[in-house]
Each structure stands twice: as structure tokens, then as C-alpha cells.
Image (cartoon, helix red, strand yellow):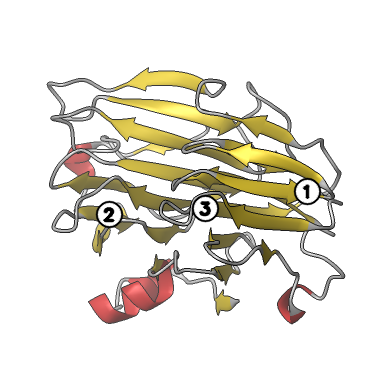
């Protein structure tokens, strides 16, 4: 498990491209028969990529959590962005087709991941944050997610937000998670941009070809920065930072949020004319 410290916006404005990527960018999340985890001290979120092929992979706590098992004091969400796989939670198997999601509450001890077809292995994208009580396991496929159409073709940001882990879909402690898909011809994931001081966010960008990219915008409104993102790479967005992005073509992204509240609309919009 890699550890990332929290960052002060006064310091971040002096970061080089290399330092920005070192602090906020997460690459190589999915490698065969491996669990890659990044622990951020920003709201103590853990971002993980789990890709079983030949071996069944078990989620362990590790010394960094000082816990007997991974979800002893945590909850987690997972969306499968690869081929069909199976997640086993305390002996119960859940079939995970492409774009299926699942919420696993605090207190579940034995969690493992396995592949169904080695020619098309699953890629389990996991977000986990501290929890204060236990809620039931809920399987959420994309048809059960709440769909929120947004944007327009004229503004190049027509998209559908699929809310998987969200108060209007199911109950969790503080984790919120979903998948946003942009229409063909749209490339802005949100504009005008916004901040939300009461929670942080992690993005995973996907559905991009090898030669495509998303320019993820971050920083304070008057001190913006960008990080170039490629397919299946993630980025940590602190609560003080704007977050918006524009791609070379349409794409999708998974968002995961945790912090003070779960109110999706609790955000402070920034007028585009005020960005610098």
C-alpha cells in the first residue's frame, strides 16, 4: 500500500509537473494477479485496482491500517470495469459483470476476487473510507444505478451520471460512488467547475484509446493546474481544489467521494470567467 500525504494549496501552486503527478496522479492500477492500493491522508480514502487472472486475490488489511481485517473500521465500493468476475464476501459469491457495482459495509471479514475468463479478466476498481456503523452488502448493476442526464451538445458536456452508492439508491456511512459517461461529441466532464469543501474526490478515467488523453484541471480557481490523464488512471482531488476535465474525445470516469456529508449538490460553482 502506497501512502500519500495531504497537501496545502499554498504549497501546491509551486509544484512542478513531476511533483503534481507524484502527489495526485495514480498510474498502473491494474496489473495481472495484483492488488495495487494507494492510501491518501485526504479523508483517509483508499483507492485500489484489483485484477485477478490466474489467482484468487484476497483483500488484506496490511500494517498500514493496524486492523485485523480490511473492513474492520471501513466501508468500500467497487465497480468492475473489465470482464466478468466474482467477489466473495464472507462466503457469499457475487457475480460481477462489466460495469456492475457493489457496496460492502464495515465488519465483513473475508473478501476475495477471482476471474471467470482469463482471456477477458475483470478489473475491480475499489474505493474505501472510514465507517462508523455497518450497512448491508448491496449489489448495484448499472441498470439499478440512478441516472441523471446533464449538460448539452452545445456546451460539449452532454453526459449521464450513474449514481451507484448514493443516498437515493442505498445507504452508506460516507462513501459516494458512481460512473459518468459522456456522449459522443462531448468532452468536458463538467463546466462550470466547482469545489466542495466538505468532501474530497477521486476520479478514475476510462474508455479512452491508447492515444487519447484527458486534461484534468485542478488547483485553486485563481491558480489552476492540470494533470494529463490516460486510460484507467486515477487522480486525487482535494476538497479545496477545482475539478473538471476535457478530453481529446468522449470518455467515462468513475468518481468516489467521502468527507463531511453525502449531499451530491453541496458544491460551490466557479464562474468560468473567474478562472485563471
Position of residue 70 relative to residue 115, above or below, is: below
* Inter-mark Cα distance, 1 to 3: 16 Å
Position of residue 188 relative to residue 39, above or below, is: above
Between 162 and 23, the one nearer to me in the picture? 162
Disc 2, disc 3: CB below 8 Å?
no
| Residue 20, picture quadrant | bottom left
Taking 120 as reference, is 246 left or right? left
Q: Which structural element holds mark 1?
A: strand
Decide which of tag 1 and tag 3 comes sooner along the chain.
1
For the N terminus, the quadrant is bottom right
- List x then y, in percent, for residue 111: 75, 56
| Residue 158, picture quadrant | top left
Q: Residue at x 37, y 43 (%)?
A: 253
- List x then y, in percent, for residue 110: 81, 58
Q: Which mark is residue 255?
A: none
- List x then y, in percent, for residue 81: 44, 46
- List x then y, in percent, for residue 222: 26, 56
Q: Which residue is mark 2?
A: 216
Disc 2, disc 1: CB below 8 Å?
no
Q: Which mark is residue 125?
A: 3
Few, some or many residues within 10 Å of mark 1 (<14, 14–19, 20+)? some
Q: Residue at x 39, y 34 (%)?
A: 180
Q: Which structural element holds mark 3?
A: strand
Q: In front: mark 2 or mark 3?
A: 3
Q: Which mark is residue 89?
A: 1
Q: Residue at x 45, y 46 (%)?
A: 83
Amino acid at each position: 500500500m502506497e501512502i500519500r500525504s495531504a497537501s496545502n494549496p499554498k504549497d501546491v501552486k509551486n509544484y512542478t509537473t513531476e511533483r503534481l503527478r507524484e502527489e495526485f496522479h495514480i498510474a498502473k492500477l491494474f496489473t495481472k494477479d495484483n492488488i495495487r492500493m494507494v492510501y491518501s491522508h485526504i479523508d483517509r480514502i483508499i483507492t485500489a485496482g484489483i485484477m485477478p487472472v490466474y489467482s484468487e486475490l484476497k483483500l488484506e488489511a496490511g500494517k498500514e491500517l493496524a486492523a485485523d481485517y480490511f473492513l474492520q473500521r471501513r466501508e468500500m465500493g467497487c465497480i468492475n470495469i473489465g470482464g466478468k468476475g466474482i467477489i466473495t464476501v464472507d462466503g457469499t459469491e457475487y457475480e460481477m459483470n462489466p460495469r456492475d457495482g457493489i457496496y460492502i459495509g464495515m465488519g465483513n471479514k473475508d473478501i476475495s476476487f477471482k476471474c471467470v475468463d482469463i482471456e477477458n479478466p475483470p478489473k475491480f476498481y475499489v474505493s474505501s473510507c472510514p465507517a462508523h456503523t455497518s450497512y448491508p452488502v448491496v449489489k448495484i448493476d448499472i441498470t439499478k444505478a440512478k441516472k441523471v442526464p446533464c449538460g448539452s451538445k452545445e456546451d460539449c458536456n452532454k453526459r449521464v451520471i450513474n449514481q451507484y452508492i448514493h443516498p437515493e439508491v442505498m445507504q452508506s456511512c460516507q462513501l459516494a460512488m458512481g460512473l459518468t459517461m459522456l456522449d459522443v461529441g462531448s468532452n468536458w466532464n463538467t463546466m462550470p467547475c466547482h469545489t466542495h469543501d466538505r468532501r474530497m474526490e477521486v476520479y478514475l478515467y476510462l474508455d479512452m484509446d491508447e492515444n487519447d488523453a484527458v486534461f484534468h484541471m485542478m488547483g485553486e480557481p485563481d491558480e489552476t493546474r492540470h494533470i494529463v490523464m490516460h486510460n484507467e488512471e486515477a487522480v486525487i482531488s482535494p476538497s479545496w481544489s477545482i475539478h473538471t476535465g476535457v478530453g481529446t474525445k468522449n470518455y467515462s470516469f468513475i468518481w468516489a467521494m467521502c468527507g463531511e456529508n453525502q449531499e451530491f449538490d453541496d458544491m460551490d460553482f466557479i464562474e468560468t470567467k473567474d478562472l485563471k
